[in-house]
Amino acid sequence: MVLKLFGLGLKEYLFDYFNIFDGTIVILSILDLINLFPGNAQVTVFRAFRLLRIFKLINQIPQVKKLLVTVVNSLPALSNLGFLVVLFLFIYALIAKQVYGDHILLD
């Protein structure tokens, strides 16, 4: 962050929203590392925001963007598949209860 800030200058660095996001995450992570907020679990949530920096790659690499669009488009089909799996488990549970009764013998 510091090298990018020196290389671009303050005005150019603050022009990109991803740079502001990265800078905020880095500063909050440094504050968390030096335990400026001891015992405060809310500050450790910022560690999860570091994963959001991966979305920066989506704008830079078109193949990753195409892959993400494919995954998002397949989510409705996955929900249908999940519903079918739950339905089969329910049916098999009813069959098992009918065959074995209220308790299943484990022999």
Image (cartoon, helix red, strand yellow):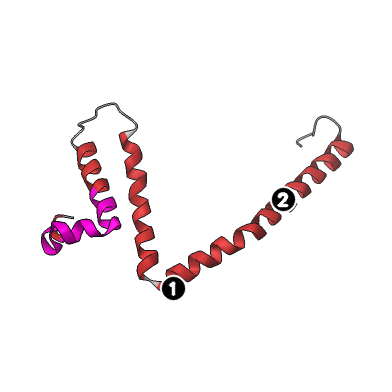
Q: Which residue is labeled 2 in the image?
A: 83
Q: Where does the image place residue 9, in percent across and percent down from the top left?
A: 12, 60
Q: Where does the image place residue 19, in percent across and percent down from the top left?
A: 25, 56
**Based on the displayed image, in which of its 4 quarters is residue 98 positioned?**
top right
Whether residue 5 appears in magenta in the rendering, the answer is: yes
Of the residues under marks 1 and 2, which one precedes in the sequence? 1
In what element is the residue under mark 1?
A: helix
Left or right of 88? Residue 73 is left
Q: Which residues are magenta?
A: 4-23
Q: Where does the image place residue 32, in percent across and percent down from the top left?
A: 24, 37
- Specify the farthest residue to the left: 6
For the residue pair 60 and 101, the one nearer the viewer reads as 60
Question: What quarter of the picture does the N terminus occupy?
Answer: bottom left
Mark 1 and mark 2: span between their CA atoms?
31 Å
Q: Residue at x 30, y 35 (%)?
A: 43
Q: Residue 63: which numbered mark, if any?
A: 1
Amino acid type, residue under disc 2 in the picture = Phe
